[in-house]
């Protein structure tokens, strides 16, 4: 089995994680590990081991998150796969309140030449700015707007939806309710399928709530 097959499994796991399908993400990680071990590509498997663990519904300590990041750093795998795993690590850092590590990981993502996923990394940067001890909604708004622009330039509608959801939520909290509905409603209206995915379900739930408010 070609090593690229394993890398594609890792990317598929990341996509499923972003879609909120954590069980499938974990299975992709486990299949990646099993395949790499079977065909002698163990050196490529570290990111997949991290994916399989992070996709589990469990809380992670700061110590464990740092250990997992070290596994990714030492892996002899594709740089893109490492970046994707670190973006998941950032999610878990934010969930556990380890903002300092999240900032370090985010700096790595933004300094990399990973144009394909830059819109999502910018969105994460904005979300992180809202989670700091002193939230910076102005800078977060700028990040979300940049993420939307990059996603539109790339035709990446899923990333555009995620960034629009983040920006619209911020605007709604700031009292910009019409702007929030128009932004998110416009992006949501583009989709004709995939309405069972968590991102679209969340967008619809917000739009329904805002229509009533």
Image: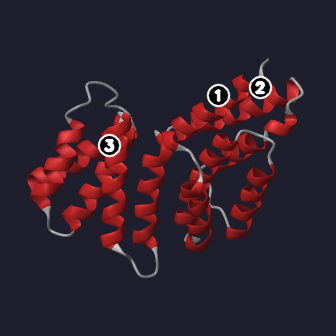
- Give the colour scheme of this rendering: secondary structure
Judged left or right of residue 101, residue 190 is left
Q: Which mark is residue 3?
A: 2
Residue depicted at 32% across the width and 72% down the height: 137
Give residue 106's quadrant in the image: bottom right
Q: What residue is disc 3 on?
A: 161
Coordinates of residue 104 in the picture (x, y in percent): 61, 67
Q: CA separation, marks 3 and 1?
A: 24 Å
Vertical placement of 8 versus 198: above or below?
above
- Quarter containing the C terminus: bottom left
Q: Give whichever of discs 2 and 1 has the lower sequence position.
A: 2
Q: Residue furthest bottom?
A: 134
Indicate which disc, 3 or 1, sits on the residue closer to the N terminus. 1
Mark 2 or mark 3: name the one nearer the start of the chain.
2
Q: Circle 3 — which element? A: helix
Q: Residue at x 10, y 53 (%)?
A: 212
Q: Nearer the viewer, residue 112 or 85?
A: 112
- Report, in whole angstroms, how far the alpha carbon at label 2 lies from the one at label 3: 32 Å
Quadrant hosting residue 144: bottom left
Whether residue 171 is situated above or below residue 75 in the rendered picture: below
Q: What label sits on residue 8 in the rendered view?
A: 1
């Amino acid at each position: 089995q070609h090593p690229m097959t394993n890398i594609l499994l890792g990317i598929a796991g990341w996509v499923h994680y972003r879609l909120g399908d954590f069980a499938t993400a974990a299975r992709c990680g486990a299949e990646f590990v099993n395949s790499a071990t079977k065909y002698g590509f163990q050196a490529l498997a570290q990111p997949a081991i991290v994916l399989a663990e992070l996709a589990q519904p469990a809380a992670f300590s700061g110590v464990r998150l740092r250990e997992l990041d070290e596994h990714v750093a030492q892996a002899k795998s594709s740089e893109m796969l490492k970046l994707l795993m670190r973006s998941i690590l950032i999610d878990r850092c934010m969930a556990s309140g380890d903002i300092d590590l999240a900032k370090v990981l985010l700096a790595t993502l933004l300094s990399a030449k990973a144009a394909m996923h830059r819109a999502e990394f910018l969105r994460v940067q904005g979300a992180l700015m809202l989670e700091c001890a002193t939230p910076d909604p102005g800078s977060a708004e700028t990040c979300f707007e940049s993420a939307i622009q990059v996603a539109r330039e790339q035709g990446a509608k899923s990333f555009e939806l995620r960034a629009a959801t983040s920006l619209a939520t911020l605007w709604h909290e700031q009292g910009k309710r019409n702007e929030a509905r128009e932004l998110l409603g416009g992006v949501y209206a583009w989709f004709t399928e995939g309405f069972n995915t968590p991102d679209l379900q969340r967008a619809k739930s917000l739009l329904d709530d805002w229509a009533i408010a």
